[in-house]
Amino acid sequence: MRLSERQKHILFEAELQAARSIPELAEAVGIRAHAVRYELQKLSSLEVVVKRSPFIDLYRLGFIPYTIYFSFAGSSKEQEHEILVKLMSSPLVIWLIELGGEFQYGLSICARNMLEVIRLLNRIALRFGNVFFNKSVNVRTAYTYFGRRYLWPEKARHFFHRAAMTDDHVRVDETDMQLLAGLSADSLTSLRSLAAKLHIPQTTFERRKARLETTGVIPAYHYRMSPEKMGMQSYKLLIYLKGLHPRLSQRIIEVAFESPWTLYCIECMGTWDYELGIEVEKASEVTAVTRLFYDRLGSEISTIKIAPVFRYHKYSNFPASVRLSSATQSLDDH
């Protein structure tokens, strides 16, 4: 659908600050609260706004996101489907996407260490044989989310959400994990209803949620949106640098921020060094983003590969149903 200017402005103001009240959002946009409420309800019914979701800092919980990009090797469509279903059924797999370009698929495994990743892949290999080829494994060491600044380019946005690998972990227990999974999967439900659904007493739910927020596990809330419903095309840009440049990260982020089409910038350790997510109206606009990087950092960049994102088969921002070891403690314990 084609968004109105008012809808674009509302989504721009709401996306990265989804915890704001309707009156606060109305003040930022400059219209009445009932108009904001109506537009958000309409956009939700049209599935432009998918859900209100917590931005969970997985690194603070001791998790590491591993990404695997791959293509299938000589398997039938039926076997490929069976493998995808098997991968999506794992609670460790938080998203799985279908791609164009060099790779057919990409997935993210949220694990505490590489051993968990190896075990999952070995189970697939033991059951289906050697079905992967041209695979690439990367560790995501930091994630910076800018949001959809193209919605309202007239207004500069000077803040964003960021998470990075750390050894300063927040200890949580099964109740905390259950709460995080519930907020991620069912965030449009009222908190009272969600607490009842999770069988967590209301006062406990509110206290645990507040502690997760103040300790930085949930630094913010955002609205998830459907680019397809807004007429946008999604791409991933895979940036390969010439050698290791640990001091280049800030410059990469700054250049990424120059383009309103760039949603996020991910720092990686693996086959490539940075991964950008972009959304554009026309495929030709992808070239403008790649040209920007070559113009600014051409001497440091080896190549940039483009991967169109065709479809999300699974998406979550939290590894649901993952159990903790008995050694971990509750936030209430310290």
Image (tube, rainbow, N blue to C red):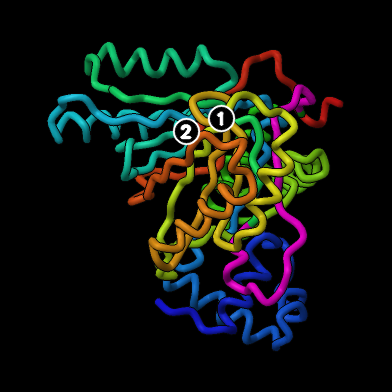
Q: In the image, residue 233 lies at what x, y percent? A: 40, 60
Q: Identity of the amino acid at label 2? A: Ser
Q: Identity of the amino acid at label 1? A: Pro
Residue drawn 48% across and 30% down? 67
Residue drawn 22% across and 18% down? 128
Q: Which residue is mark 1?
A: 65
Instruction: Please say whether residue 203 is visible from this viewpoint.
Output: no
203 or 77: nearer the eye? 77
Q: Is residue 12 above or below residue 220?
A: below
Q: What residue range appears in magenta?
A: 147-169
Residue drawn 71% across and 62% down? 17
Instruction: Classify residue 158 by image quadrant.
Output: bottom right
Disc marking residue 108 = 2
Instruction: Please say whether residue 63 is visible from this viewpoint.
Output: yes
Q: Pointers 1 and 2 in contact (CB under 8 A)?
A: yes
Instruction: Classify residue 33 by image quadrant.
Output: bottom right
- Residue 146 in the magenta stretch? The answer is no
Disc marking residue 250 = none
Residue drawn 70% across and 37% down? 249
Label 2 neighbour load within 10 Å: few <14, some 14-19, many 20+: many
Q: In the image, residue 181 lies at what x, y percent? A: 57, 40
